[in-house]
Image: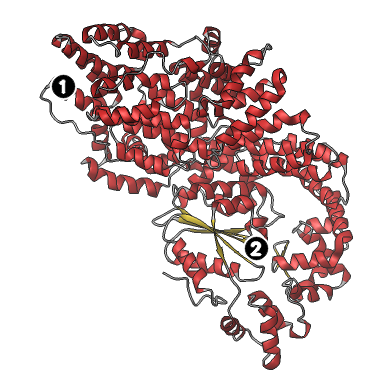
């Protein structure tokens, strides 16, 4: 396929046209870049036209610095079926359209952006073309970044083409989207375009114009039209002569427009002398168009030419006039800021004060205000403004932006000024490194700071350090935490329980964690989620789910702040350990395509790892491999992920009877220096017994905990490891029974059932076949309940019970497809399923179309019957 060769003005650049045409073949995004006037807009217009011809729904928009919040996305939002969105998302979109977006949670808008893109997709993906993306209003740009992130995962039925000048490429967008560079026209192409221009001169003038234009189509057109005034090679020169020839009043009018206002009424209010007559000379020379009470520049270069001709003094005067008559306080503040020509501490304080009043969707605007405050602050306040901006950006999930701001803040602080704010700077920096997967960097930064600050270390920094310390296991950071946490003698509050549970666990910490109440109040949810993570560390999974559940639900529904982003991973492990695997998938599968983790590779990888572990334990290694391949990071590079994956893979190998492979994988898991390695040891001991290898000592993996306290689970696992070290099978089975028959062991049904199989083997060796059979029947019930198909098959084989084959109907489906099937069986429409999983209705329908024949069903009623039967089994 190729772009329409007959599009007016579309000449040359066959390579670019081919790349754009290929973009239409599937979901994805690209960034069209090139010099001003090089023809990007013409190419983008042709791309949109071609997309519409092929049947794609097309939305075109562009950047305009004068537009209000979300003005660039109005063409998209206005086409949405808002009533079909989840309630929180619907309210967010309506508020954005009404200009009241500051009161809406930003995540709801991000989720709505992706759902709307799915809504609008038909037989072909939605095509969104955004011209001048560098000039898009900040709130719209935030949502466009989210869209670009999700498209980079190929999880959305949409194609996005962003367009901007090479020297104005937004850094965050450039990291996400591949560039397509528009080169100048070749010599023959330039001549071909020149021949299409009416009234273009010929002879020597023709060759001189083509030479000066240097392959730039806009320059070629303007030089051809104004041949007598052509001069210089800078593209802005093509308009400079016309601007310079304008009457003084017309230049004043254009300066006000270039200063950021397009409304004729607003400009006339700022300068009553600017009447309609003042605009006519600029219209007559083709510099602007005036319609619907708005003035529009023919090209951004006209704006630059106007501002250059006016000079800095006139520009500041224009901003002062506009500030004096602005009806929107924030707009007036923006103009006053642009009018300032030197640092102004009072203005900086006003900017910061206005930023602190904004939350929710207004956070993006707040960050911009704080950046402006930095420009006008003096002394140490400059760095603090940038640091505060970085904190706000991080809270909004703009990790790349926050990192850039923090780098600038550190540079502004200097080596001699850092001590007063070091903990805050380190805390933010380490969090950014952690969620990006740069754990070693985060660890070194935190450990060094904790050692230097000694007893004065703030408790909040220790809470921040607990997450990377947990992910990394034993090492420099964990050692620093074990030293620092006991020194905190104050009562820092519930979130500090996470650091205490990691570094100094005990009955007192456990009692405080269990006493915490869950909450659905967004203001308190972060506290509850942090305590829920502490419950996971203390092996209290039911309480972990209780405390983490509301935060995960809010994240999945797009109605929570980004401070809860680590909650799904912790909740997922708690559900895995308690055998609630279907619940884990129900919570985590939507996050595979949700925008809430768009800039946090580590946390997205964590979601994929939990789902992959469930797949291994269910006996679905192909699904697990697909999940791990789709993650943004190598999961085996994170110690705790490597431990859990190798543990799950080892158990899967044992289910299939490959005890040598099980021993190899379980040995790799137990070699990770992490508290959770103690949980692996009984399974490793069982594999060692089966293969004749040395069995691990009962206390291995527990001595590094830094405390004599062990949870019931870990104490039981240590006892089981010791029991499997017995040479006498009868003694070993009896010792195992003391642990496995304890009602508390049933809190971990899969772990218990796996070792019950080993206990049954010992009983058979001890000449107790009836007892062995009873143990296996109990284990089979547990395996069937959690859905561990491989282990259930092994037990059935050992029982030698003839049974009708019960294949897993979902074995060939992806985790996402299984969730689609389950939701469809509940009666949800394709649109409702898409809204819940951040997929287009067309994508949902496509999955169901492929899945129905695999499952042997023809409609949703049969699907519900199949699902009910499978779950009962």
Mark yes or no: residue 547 visible: yes
Expressed as whole percent of the image width and height from the top left, the position of residue 647 reads 36, 27
Would residue 756 be found to the left or right of residue 840 on screen?
Answer: left
Q: What residue is at 47 percent from the left and 58 percent from the top?
A: 57
Expressed as whole percent of the image width and height from the top left, the position of residue 154 reads 44, 49
Check disc 1 and report the residue beneath it. 798
Position of residue 49 relative to residue 671, above or below, is: below
Would residue 856 be found to the left or right of residue 663 on screen?
Answer: left
Check disc 2 and report the residue beneath it. 165
Position of residue 196 relative to residue 749, above or below, is: below
**Towards the viewer: 840 or 268:** 840
Quadrant, the C terminus: top left
View extreme (bottom): residue: 203
**Towards the viewer: 257 or 513:** 513
Q: Quadrant of residue 455 in the image? A: top right
Crowd rating for badge 2 (residues with CA inside 10 Å; few <14, some 14–19, many 20+): many
Expressed as whole percent of the image width and height from the top left, the position of residue 104 reads 62, 37
């Amino acid at each position: 396929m190729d772009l329409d060769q007959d599009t007016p003005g579309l000449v040359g650049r066959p390579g670019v046209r081919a790349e754009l045409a290929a973009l239409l073949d599937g979901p994805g995004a690209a960034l069209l870049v090139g010099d001003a006037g090089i023809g990007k807009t013409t190419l983008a217009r042709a791309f949109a036209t071609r997309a519409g011809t092929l049947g794609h729904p097309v939305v075109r928009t562009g950047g305009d610095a004068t537009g209000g919040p979300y003005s660039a996305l109005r063409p998209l939002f206005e086409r949405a079926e808002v009533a079909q969105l989840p309630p929180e998302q619907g309210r967010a979109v309506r508020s954005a359209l009404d200009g009241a977006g500051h009161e809406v949670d930003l995540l709801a808008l991000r989720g709505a952006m992706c759902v709307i893109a799915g809504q609008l997709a038909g037989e072909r993906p939605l095509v969104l073309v955004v011209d001048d993306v560098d000039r898009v209003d900040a709130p719209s740009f935030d949502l466009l970044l989210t869209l670009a992130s999700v498209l980079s995962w190929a999880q959305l039925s949409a194609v996005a083409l962003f367009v901007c000048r090479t020297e104005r490429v937004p850094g965050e967008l450039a990291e996400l989207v591949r560039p397509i560079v528009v080169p100048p026209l070749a010599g023959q192409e330039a001549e071909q375009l020149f021949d299409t221009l009416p009234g273009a001169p010929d002879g020597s003038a023709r060759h001189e114009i083509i030479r000066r234009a240097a392959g730039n189509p806009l320059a070629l057109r303007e030089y051809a039209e104004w041949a007598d005034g052509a001069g210089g090679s800078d593209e802005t020169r093509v308009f400079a002569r016309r601007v310079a020839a304008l009457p003084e009043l017309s230049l004043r009018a254009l300066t006000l427009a270039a200063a950021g206002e397009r409304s004729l009424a607003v400009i006339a209010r700022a300068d009553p002398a600017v009447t309609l007559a003042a605009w006519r000379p600029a219209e007559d020379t083709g510099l602007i168009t005036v319609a619907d009470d708005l003035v529009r520049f023919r090209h951004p270069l006209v704006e630059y030419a106007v501002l250059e001709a006016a000079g800095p003094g006139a520009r500041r005067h224009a901003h002062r006039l506009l500030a004096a008559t602005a009806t929107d306080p924030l707009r007036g503040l923006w103009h006053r800021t642009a009018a300032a020509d030197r640092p102004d501490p009072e203005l900086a304080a006003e900017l910061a004060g206005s930023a602190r009043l904004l939350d929710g969707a207004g956070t993006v605007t707040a960050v911009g205000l704080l950046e402006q405050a930095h420009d006008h602050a003096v002394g140490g306040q400059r760095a603090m403004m940038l640091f505060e901006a970085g904190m706000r950006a991080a809270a909004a999930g703009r990790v790349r932006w926050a990192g850039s701001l923090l780098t600038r803040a550190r540079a502004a602080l200097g080596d001699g000024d850092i001590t007063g704010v070091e903990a805050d700077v380190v805390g933010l920096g380490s969090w950014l490194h952690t969620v990006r997967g740069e754990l070693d960097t985060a660890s070194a930064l935190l450990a060094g700071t904790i050692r230097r600050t000694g007893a004065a270390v703030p408790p909040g920094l220790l809470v921040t350090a607990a997450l990377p310390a947990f992910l990394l296991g034993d090492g420099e950071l964990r050692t620093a935490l074990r030293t620092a946490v006991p020194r905190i003698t104050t009562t820092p509050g519930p979130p500090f329980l996470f650091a205490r549970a990691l570094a100094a666990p005990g009955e007192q910490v456990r009692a405080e964690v269990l006493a915490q109440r869950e909450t659905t109040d967004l203001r308190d949810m972060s506290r509850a989620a942090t305590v829920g993570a502490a419950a996971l560390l203390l092996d209290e999974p039911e309480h972990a789910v209780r405390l983490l559940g509301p935060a995960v639900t809010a994240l999945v529904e797009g109605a929570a702040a980004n401070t809860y982003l680590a909650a799904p991973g912790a909740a997922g492990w708690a559900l895995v350990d308690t055998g609630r695997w279907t619940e884990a998938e129900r919570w985590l599968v939507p996050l595979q395509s949700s925008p809430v983790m768009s800039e946090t590779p580590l946390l997205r990888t964590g979601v994929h790892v939990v789902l992959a572990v469930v797949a291994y334990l269910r006996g679905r290694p192909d699904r697990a491999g697909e999940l791990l391949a789709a993650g943004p990071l190598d999961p085996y590079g994170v110690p705790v992920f490597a431990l859990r994956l190798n543990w799950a893979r080892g158990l899967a190998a044992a289910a299939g009877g490959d005890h040598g492979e099980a021993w190899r994988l379980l040995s790799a898991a137990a070699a990770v220096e992490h508290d959770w390695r103690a949980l692996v040891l009984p399974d490793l001991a069982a594999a060692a017994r089966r293969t004749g290898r040395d069995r691990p000592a009962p206390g291995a993996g527990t001595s590094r905990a830094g405390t004599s306290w062990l949870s019931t689970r870990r104490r039981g696992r240590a006892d089981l490891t010791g029991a499997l070290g017995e040479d006498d099978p009868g003694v070993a089975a009896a010792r195992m029974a003391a642990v496995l028959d304890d009602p508390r062991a049933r809190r971990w049904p899969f772990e218990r059932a796996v070792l019950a199989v080993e206990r049954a083997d010992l009983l058979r060796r001890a000449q107790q076949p009836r007892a062995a059979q009873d143990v296996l029947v109990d284990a089979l019930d547990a395996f069937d309940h959690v859905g561990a198909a491989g282990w259930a098959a092994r037990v059935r084989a050992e029982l030698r019970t003839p049974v009708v084959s019960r294949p897993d109907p979902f074995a060939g489906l992806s985790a996402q497809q299984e969730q689609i099937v389950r939701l469809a069986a509940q009666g949800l429409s394709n649109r409702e399923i898409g809204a819940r999983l951040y997929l287009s209705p067309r994508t949902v329908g496509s999955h169901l179309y492929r899945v129905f024949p695999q499952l042997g069903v023809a409609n949703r009623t049969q699907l519900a019957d199949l699902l009910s039967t499978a779950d009962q089994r």
